[in-house]
Image: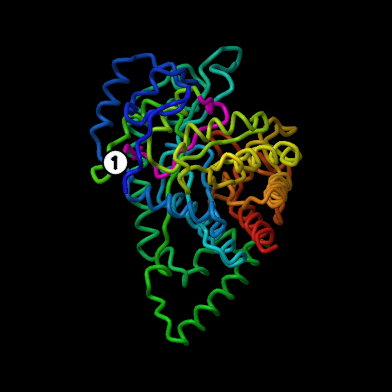
């Protein structure tokens, strides 16, 4: 059923009858690259606008329906994946290993909580990152900041850091290949629940978290044997396949505009670069270009909410992004930092509830807990990450809201980027396998540690 068109009655509210994918261009747009060749950029964007969609409107509508279950307290959202995908680390193995960790976490959360887990990856499009400064000093020379492989390269030279619009096209093709492989894995047998043991290989199987997962996998197998003995058909698609959706921050608006198409069934606009798009903490101004763009697409959308947000600002943002108050449309991603949720979050949750917006509340415990270690590397500690999640659960329950999900940066690789975990990564070990192009990620063992702890929170 098509969504009802509404006209603006308040300043900053969307007018869906006049909105177009290019409407954002009349608004102030932060975090946009300084493209050196406007004609080259325009040429590339025209090519992208004629390419096939990466995802389809019907898929986005299905995700909205699943997120409506989360908003109602009947499901849990696991949104996880890379901080920033890399053009240099693009292999079938890396995609498979990332998916495997997410499937493992989902199995732990589902079995521990008894509610379905909606699985959304930060993958197949998470190539751009906001920066606090347009430039940085390297060996005494000022060069443009690295904005993700969608825009420039991470090598510390002027040539590498100059924004190159051809990267937008490269990102499209890498995303298409990644999506093709994800669909093969999730529909072709890899995600079969009877294969839970096969997801636990190599270093994860040897870790304390991996051994704990093995015990859970054995319990799942016993349950499946019981169901089979009772005559239940385990070849059904719900056990052999999983729904897996993609997401990224809608940061580089020219690219997102070029990927936006009008749905032939409903007439609504959809950004076909991902199933879910979100606006970040740095770009969520109600009158800004990013909020304006997201207000007009019909995908489910998210918004990062940091400690500086006020109840009035957040309600205004909800009104902008979801004026029709559609369940499953809007995900609010709290990223406060440990120790801040108790004082900042209750007023925000209360104001949104009173406004009547049926949002999904989730917790991003990563971005508010980043610090620089003694060796100069950015890192995070698993104890701080888990501490913020625990605070989030406590506040949500105190305010009568469902703690609907977690938003995690992780990798399937055996990296040493975040501290802590049952197989503890120490600060002096950060240099061993620190491969991220931007922010530090949890490795597979740490991700499982976190999943078991979150399952305990859900169980209580």
Left or right: residue 444 compared with residue 17: right
Query: Is residue 88 or residue 253 the one in the foreground?
Result: 253
Q: Quadrant of the C terminus?
A: bottom right
Q: Around disc 1, counting alpha carbons within 10 Å, would you say few (fewer than 14), some (14 to 19), or many (20 or more)?
A: some
For image coordinates 43% across by 86% down, the residue present is 231
Looking at the rendering, the stretch of residues picked out in magenta corresponds to 268-286
For image coordinates 33% across by 45% down, the residue present is 55
Q: How many marks?
A: 1
Left or right: residue 100 compared with residue 458: left
**Residue 245: x, y in percent?**
42, 50
Visual colour scheme: rainbow
The secondary structure that most of the magenta stretch takes on is: loop
Task: Confirm whether residue 425 shows in the render.
Answer: no
Residue 304 drawn in magenta = no
Q: Disc 1 on helix, strand or loop?
A: loop
Query: Is residue 290 or residue 3 the one in the foreground?
Result: 3
**Residue 178: x, y in percent?**
37, 47
Single out the residue that lies furthest toward the front. Answer: 9
Label 1, on which residue? 53
Residue 283 drawn in magenta = yes
- Residue 124 in which image quadrant: top left
For image coordinates 52% across by 62% down, the residue present is 116
Vertical order, 203 against 390 (above or below): below
**Residue 374: x, y in percent?**
75, 32
């Amino acid at each position: 059923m098509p969504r009802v068109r509404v006209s603006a009655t308040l300043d900053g509210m969307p007018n869906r009858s006049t909105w177009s994918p290019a409407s954002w261009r009349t608004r102030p747009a932060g975090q946009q690259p300084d493209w050196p060749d406007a004609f080259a950029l325009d040429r590339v964007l025209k090519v992208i606008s004629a390419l096939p969609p990466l995802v389809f409107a019907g898929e986005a509508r299905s995700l909205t329906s699943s997120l409506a279950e989360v908003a109602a307290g009947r499901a849990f959202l696991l949104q996880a994946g890379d901080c920033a995908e890399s053009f240099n680390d693009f292999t079938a193995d890396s995609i498979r290993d990332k998916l495997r960790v997410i499937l493992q976490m989902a199995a732990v959360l589902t079995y521990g909580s008894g509610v379905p887990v909606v699985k959304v990856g930060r993958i197949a499009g998470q190539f751009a990152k906001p920066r606090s400064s347009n430039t940085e000093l390297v060996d005494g020379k000022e060069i443009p900041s690295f904005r993700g492989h969608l825009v420039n390269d991470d090598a510390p030279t002027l040539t590498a850091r100059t924004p190159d619009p051809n990267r937008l096209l490269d990102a499209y093709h890498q995303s298409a290949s990644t999506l093709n492989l994800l669909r093969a894995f999730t529909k072709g047998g890899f995600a079969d629940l009877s294969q839970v043991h096969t997801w636990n290989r190599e270093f994860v199987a040897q870790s304390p978290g991996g051994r704990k997962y093995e015990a859970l996998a054995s319990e799942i197998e016993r349950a499946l044997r019981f169901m089979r003995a009772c005559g239940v058909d385990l070849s059904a698609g719900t056990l052999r396949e999983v729904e897996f959706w993609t997401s990224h921050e809608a940061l580089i608006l020219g690219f997102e505009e070029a990927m936006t198409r009008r749905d032939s069934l409903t007439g609504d606009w959809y950004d076909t670069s991902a199933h879910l798009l979100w606006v970040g903490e740095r770009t969520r101004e109600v009158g800004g270009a990013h909020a304006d763009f997201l207000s007009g697409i019909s995908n489910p959308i998210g918004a990062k909410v940091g400690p500086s947000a006020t109840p009035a600002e957040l309600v205004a943002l909800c009104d902008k992004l979801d004026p029709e108050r559609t369940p499953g449309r809007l995900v609010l991603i709290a990223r406060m930092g440990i120790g801040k949720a108790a004082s900042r979050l209750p007023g925000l949750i209360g104001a949104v509830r009173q406004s009547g917006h049926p949002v999904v509340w989730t917790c991003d415990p990563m971005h508010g807990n980043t610090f620089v270690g003694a060796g100069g590397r950015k890192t995070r500690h698993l104890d701080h990450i888990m501490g913020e999640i625990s605070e989030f659960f406590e506040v949500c329950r105190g305010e009568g809201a469902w703690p609907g999900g977690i938003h995690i940066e992780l990798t399937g690789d055996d990296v040493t980027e975040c501290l802590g975990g049952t197989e503890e990564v120490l600060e002096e070990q950060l240099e061993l396998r620190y491969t991220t192009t931007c922010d530090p990620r949890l490795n597979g063992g740490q991700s499982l540690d976190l999943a078991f702890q979150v399952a305990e929170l859900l169980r209580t």
